[in-house]
Image (cartoon, rainbow, N blue to C red):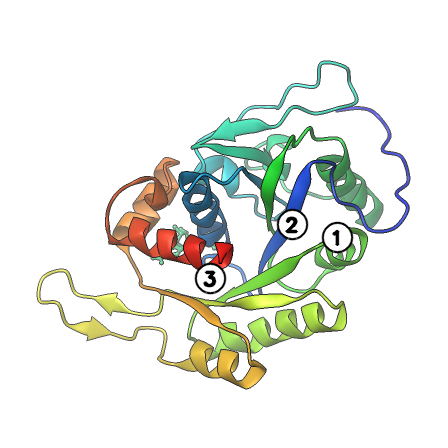
Amino acid sequence: VGGHPKPQEGPLKPAGVKRILAIGSGKGGVGKSTVSSNLAVALARVGRRVGLLDADIYGPSQPRMMGVNKRPASPDGKTIIPLEAHGVTLMSIGFMIEEGKAVVWRGPMLMGALQQMLGQVQWGELDVLIVDLPPGTGDVQLTLCTKTELDGAIVVSTPQDVSLIDARKALDMFGTLKTPVLGLIENMSLFVCPDCGSEHHIFGHGGVAAEAGKLGVPLLANLPIDLETRLAGDEGTPVATGTGPMAEAYARLAETLIK
Ligand code: ADP
């Protein structure tokens, strides 16, 4: 999609967007994108106007998780019309690249793509724009935190030490950049055997709550390892669109954030 974004003066917030909320993690594979899509759907279900920007340059998952993958239209070659899925306005870096192709962009190209996604996409009136960040503390996160008016960040981690160690770095980055951390989410916290109901702490226990306590930020949710969550994500209909216990868990998370 062509067009040259105008250089921005000061932090950018697309017109009509009330709040921008970034979802980050230290490592990949901890469920950051799963949480982002389900939270977006849960917020839309309680009547919020929600946008989801998949800025995970290296592994854009939202086209698959939200069940849409086509190139957004750009009738005038300058502005981009975002897509819609499950009541959420959606834009992904994945719409701009072919599935299975690596992103081999250097910094300036990445920044250009990000600026396009924020500045040229017609987000319309949104109560909240959720940004699914790439994992870690690289260029994209830095640019988004400094060039965008982020209202808050949430960090997703599993209870495993290797995840938590890197989650701390992400938290430290948000702290350094003065982005308010709204809280932590522990994902894959527990596996409940569907046959006998016994509980298994496959990735450890209590680490994320302890970290939240240490930092004085809320533990926003404890989300179990759940087969339906994984299947629903792979099928492009997030579990939060349904009626089961996970949909309820995401509805509670949405309520917590609205309060
Ligand atoms: P990230 O965005 O941190 O890289 P993803 O959201 O892509 O992680 O999740 C990685 C994989 O784990 C996906 O296949 C997803 O369906 C699965 N997953 C995420 N959260 C859960 C969960 N609570 N229970 C089961 N599978 C999960």
The correct choice, above or below, for 122 with respect to 39 in the image is above
Disc on res. 20 = 2
Residue 53 appears in view: no
Q: Quadrant of residue 165?
A: bottom right
Tag 2: amino acid: Ile
CB of mark 1 near ligand 1 (< 8 Å):
no
Q: Are marks 2 and 1 in contact (CB under 8 Å)?
A: yes
Query: Would residue 46 be found to the left or right of residue 56 on screen?
Result: left
Work out how far the residue at label 1 is from the one at label 3, CA to CA, in angstroms.
26 Å
Disc on res. 149 = 1
Tag 1: amino acid: Glu
Query: Would residue 229 be found to the left or right of residue 149 on screen?
Result: left
Of 115 and 259, nearer the camera is: 259
x, y percent for residue 51: 57, 39
x, y percent for residue 143: 78, 54
Which residue: 35% across, 69% down? 189
Instruction: Identify the secondary structure beneath mark 2.
Output: strand
Tag 3: amino acid: Val
CB of mark 3 near ligand 1 (< 8 Å):
yes
The correct choice, above or below, for 97 with respect to 233 in the image is above
